[in-house]
Image (cartoon, rainbow, N blue to C red):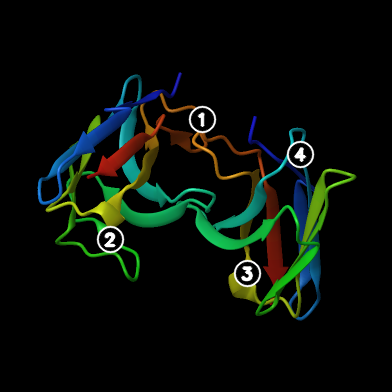
Amino acid sequence: SQQGEEDPQALSIQEGENATMNCSYKTSINNLQWYRQNSGRGLVHLILIRSNEREKHSGRLRVTLDTSKKSSSLLITASRAADTASYFCRNSGGYQKVTFGTGTKLQVIP
Amino acid sequence: GAVVSQHPSWVICKSGTSVKIECRSLDFQATTMFWYRQFPKQSLMLMATSNEGSKATYEQGVEKDKFLINHASLTLSTLTVTSAHPEDSSFYICSATGQGGWSGGYTFGSGTRLTVV
């Protein structure tokens, strides 16, 4: 399954703080993707990290990948109220059935 | 419950022709349909969002005249790739949210692999 398991399930922080969420996966990896989903909206791709990469940055986002532990983390620095959303990870880019876990619901309090 | 049927599963077409992809919600009313595209070894990229009875909202960089989306009923949304070219070859997938039997979450279709030759 391409489904990742995110944790925590929910996270509430003050604006300006950093938010860290984790993802674990079960199968071998090609690449791992993080997506954001605002309530009632479609999934938006945030960042992709390949299996041979250990860390990747994009703006305020920092993603790490530990293939030995089959886990990844997403760090959002200096969070903003607009970052309030659900965050999902997904393993690989294959054409298997697309599924997602329940995600991490992040709430950033102004 | 909450099944989305996507058809066809794969299609090969000649350059310059148009291809229609259908997504049907079988046991719920799909009030909102999302269309994604995925190139090999890449992420799902949201193309557009359509609400039943309204014009679709396209993401930046997606040509609305090339990717025609129709969501005229609560059980059917279609994506038509017009005048397809080899660079349009990709995996297209829909997902739906809804009401009336919808159990929550975002239900994905099984995807359509389009190859333009």
Drawn side of residue A54 relative to residue B34, left or right: right
Alpha-carbon span between mark 1 and mark 4: 15 Å
Q: Nearer the viewer, residue A45 or A56?
A: A56
Q: SS class of the residue under badge 4? A: loop
Is mark 1 in CB contact (under 8 Å) with mark 3?
no
Secondary structure of the residue carrying numbered label 1: loop
Label 3 vs label 4: CA separation? 24 Å
Left or right placement of residue A26 versus residue B43 in this view: right
Q: Name the residue that disc number 2 marks.
A: B57
Say which of marks 1 and 2 sits in front. Answer: 1
Q: Indicate the secondary structure of the residue bearing disc 2.
A: strand
**Alpha carbon of mark 1 to alpha carbon of mark 2: how far?**
25 Å
Task: Give how far across and how far down residue B23 sits, in percent.
Answer: 28, 32
Q: Which residue is mark 1?
A: A97
Q: Residue at x 35, y 37 (%)?
A: B113
Q: How many marks?
A: 4
Q: Amino acid at mark 1?
A: Lys
Which residue is disc 3 drawn over?
A83
Q: Position of residue B52 (x, y in %)?
A: 23, 44
Chain letter belonging to callout 3: A
Q: Nearer the viewer, residue B24 or B16?
A: B16
Of marks 1 and 3, which one's residue comes earlier in the chain? Answer: 3
Residue A54: x and y in percent read 81, 62
Residue beneath label 4, please? A25
- Assess whether mark 4 and mark 2 are in contact (beta carbons under 8 angstroms): no
Residues tagged 2 and 3 counted as in contact (Cβ below 8 A): no
